[in-house]
Image (cartoon, rainbow, N blue to C red):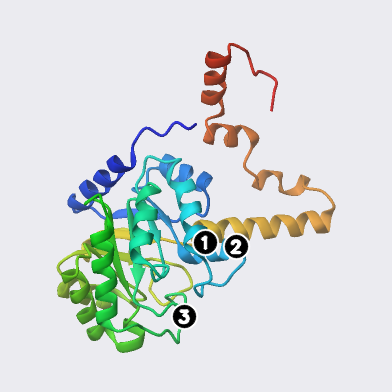
Amino acid sequence: MHFVEKKPEEKRIDLDNKLKSNKILRIPGAYNPLTAKVIEEIGYDGVYVSGGVMSNDLGYPDIGLTTLNDVSNRSKQIARVTNLPTIVDVDTGFKSCKETVQTFENSGISAIHLEDQIEQKRCGHLDNKELIPKEDMTKKIKECVEARSDKNFKIIARSDAKSVEGIDKMIDRCKSYIDAGAEIVFPEALKDEAEFEKVRKSLNCYLLANMTEFGKSKLLDFKQLEELGYNIVIYPVTTQRLAMKSVEDGLRAIFADGHQNNIIDKMQTRKRLYDLVEYEKYNSLDEKIYNFSTEGHE
């Protein structure tokens, strides 16, 4: 049981209304459900689930090794603890676009994006990517659109063609993807303001900008992206990178010092954790249902 109030259908309507507001939506990545709760509490517009993060969390590189079950199960866990809409990276569609769309729609997700790489895909900011033909990607998008039962479930087309075929051919691909039914386009690995602007001027659809660290794109302020006409900005791996750096530093300190006294101030407190997971709400609910006090128990 949890204290999320909104149904999946309502979250999808929220995403649709937010897109129509013409204000850029800021959507950080969540590598677990607890992070999604922080994202909502701070006031962001949505939650993003990165395919690369899901691979990394399993100890794999981002080269298409995760399965539909791997990503959908974790995405469902993340989406169910927040009232925010959740967008999920489904890589190349996990072989069956119909099954993928139905699975994620049934999991309470608000939108998915799939890319025009071959199944043995690579991270969008690495070199040596290979693309499928434009016609094959167009067919995938049509299958996704036909498979959804909720018209507010968004299909996002990501194109990795810029670094393979050049920006003009990428734009040409994206026009076909829009014609096939994609409402949002995700042009991956754009370099700078000039490239972001060129794509905006060339495409008549909602646009998603990826501000991932250590990649090919210049890291732009969300206001800059809004002025350039972008509708969504994602920070896909940021929370995992922050967490893993802290985890690694902390574990090295304990290994060297023999205790954790020197890093206590870097840790989330028990009180803060209990606030975040709404411990007292569950505690109160238990008391109402079972007519007993859980005071003193952990």
Tell me which amino acid carries mark 3: Leu
> Above or below — where is 56 with respect to 262?
below
What is the number of the mark on residue 141?
Answer: none
- Marks 3 and 1, how far apart in space? 17 Å
Is residue 50 among what the camera can see? yes
Query: From the viewer's perspective, is 298 left or right of 103?
Result: right
Report which residue position mark 1 lands on. 54
Is residue 225 among what the camera can see? no
Tell me which amino acid carries mark 1: Met
Q: Quadrant of the C terminus?
A: top right
Report which residue position mark 2 lands on. 58
* Label 1–label 2 contact, CB within 8 A: yes
* Label 3–label 2 contact, CB within 8 A: no
Label 3: state its secondary structure. loop
Query: From the viewer's perspective, is 6 left or right of 271?
Result: left
> Above or below — where is 66 with respect to 149?
below
Q: Residues within 10 Å of mark 1 (few under 14, many from 20)?
A: many
- Marks 1 and 2, how far apart in space? 6 Å
- Marks 3 and 2, how far apart in space? 20 Å
Which residue occupies the extreme right position in the image?
Answer: 258
Which residue occupies the extreme top position in the image?
Answer: 291
Identify which residue, 140 or 211, lies in the foreground: 140
Q: Place residue 11 in its image quadrant.
A: top left
Q: Which comes sooner in the sequence, label 3 or label 2?
A: 2
Q: Give percent across and percent down for residue 218.
A: 38, 73
Q: Residues within 10 Å of mark 3 (few under 14, many from 20)?
A: few
Report which residue position mark 3 lands on. 126
Query: From the viewer's perspective, is 2 left or right of 10?
Result: right
